[in-house]
Image: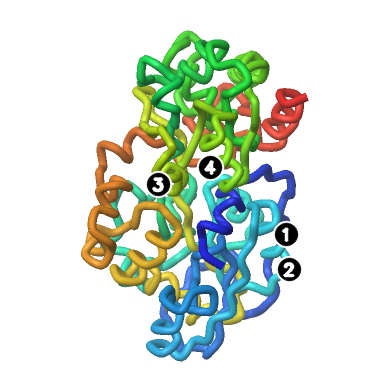
Amino acid sequence: MKLKKVKALAVVAALSIALTGCAAGASNTAGTMLDKLGANEKSLTLLGWPGYAEDGSNDPKVDWVTPFEKETGCQVTFKPYGTSDEALSLFKTGQYDAIAASGDATLRLIAGGSVQPLNTKLIPSYTGVYSFLKNRNWNTVDGKTYGVPHGYGANLLMYNTKVVTPAPTSWSVVFDGASKYKGKVTAYDSPIYIADAALYLMKHQPALGIKNPYALDDKQLAAAVTLLKAQRANVGEYWSDYLKSIQSFETGNSVVGTTWQVIKNSMSAKATVDAILPTEGATGWSDSWMIASNAKHVNCAYQWLSYIDTPKANAAATEYFGEAPVTSDACQYASAGFCDTYHAGDANYAAQIWYWTTPISKCLDGRTDVKCTDYSAWTKAWQDIKG
C-alpha cells in the first residue's frame, strides 16, 4: 500500500494505555547498555508506522529493506500499526525487536522499561544525524539515549487563499479569530493537540508562565482547555484521517486549520490552499527507532538502527513517508527540491518546532515546585473539550 493511502493512520493518536513490563526474550538485560555487537541472528522483527520499512511488496519501486537484508543477512518481518496506542499494545507482547515510535509514546516506553539505552558507538550512522535531533527529551533520559531519529516534521497552518484573507501569519486565525470562519475550522483530533493551544497561550498570554507546551500545571491546562472549548464552537471537523483532511479542504468544508506538509503537497492542482509555519512556531514530530529491552535479535536490531540513518536509506524512507530526513547526506539521494520543501537540516526552522513529547507529572520545563499534568489528564481534558 502506498503511503498516500495509509497516511490517514495519523502520526499520533490518543494514548491511554500505560505500558508495563518488558518484552520477552533474553538477549539483553533490561536497563543495561550493550557494550559490543555479536553475530547477526539472521532475523529481525520490526514495528512501525506504515511506510517505515518497505520491501517492494507494496510498490516494487519502493524498497530499502531488501538491500539491508542482503547486506546483513537479517531477514526482516515488519508489522505496521495505525495509532500510537495500538503500537504500545503490540509492543507489549514481546514479539518485536525494535519499534519506530513518536514522541508521545517514547517516554512511556522508557518509563515502562520496555526499551533499552543505546550504545551509539555501535551505530556508525548516528554521527551524521542533525545535532538538533539528538539528546532531546523524547529520545534521551538521564543522559542515556534510547532512540535514534528516523524523520521529523511540523504541524503547519493551512488555509484557503480565496476565503481566508488577509493571508494569516498567526495561529490566532484558528483560536481568537476563529469565529470569522465558524464551522469551517479544522483541528487535529488527539489530546496531544492541547499542546497547540498551550503554545499559542505561551506566546499570547505570557502571564500564565508556560515555558513548554508539554509541561502544564493544573492552572495552565485549564487555560488551554478554556481556549479549546471556545474553539470547539467554530470547528466543523476534527481530523485524524489524512485523506479526509484533503477532501475537506478540496470541497471547501474546511478553509483553515492544522495540516502536515505532505497533506498540502497531496492536494489537487485546483485546490487554492497554502501552508505556513506561523509566527508562534508549531508543534511537530520526530520519530525514533528504539530497541526492546530484551530483544531476541539485538544485533540485527542495532544493524537496522544504523542502516536506517544511512543517507540512501533515510532519503528513501522519509521521502516515501513525507517528512524531513535526519541527515544532510540523505538529500543527495532525494528528489530535486524535496529537502528544501521539508526544510531538512534548517536549524532555525527546526528550532521553531515543539516536537510531540509525552506529558508527564515531572515537569519537562524543569520546574520542581509544582506537579505537571500527565497524558491521562490530557486525555480526560480532550474528552471534555469535544463533549
Distance from the alpha carbon under mark 3 to that under mark 2: 37 Å
Is 97 displayed left or right of 54 in the figure?
Answer: right
Distance from the alpha carbon under mark 1 to that under mark 4: 29 Å
Distance from the alpha carbon under mark 2 to that under mark 4: 35 Å
Q: Position of residue 290 (x, y in %)?
A: 52, 63
According to the picture, the residue beneath numbered tag 4 turns out to be 246
Q: Position of residue 160 (x, y in %)?
A: 44, 27
Residue 12 visible (yes or no): no
Query: What kind of element bears circle 2?
Result: loop
Please report the residue visible at 38 percent of the width from the left and 88 percent of the height from the top.
Answer: 71
Question: Which mark is first along the chain, 3 or 4?
Answer: 4
Residue 167 visible (yes or no): yes
Between disc 2 and disc 4, the foreground one is: 4
Is 224 displayed left or right of 168 in the figure?
Answer: right
Rendered image quadrant of residue 235: top right
Disc 1 marks which amino acid? Answer: Ser
Distance from the alpha carbon under mark 2 to that under mark 1: 7 Å
Between disc 1 and disc 4, the foreground one is: 4
According to the picture, the residue beneath numbered tag 1 turns out to be 89
Q: Which mark is residue 265?
A: 3
Q: Which mark is residue 93?
A: 2
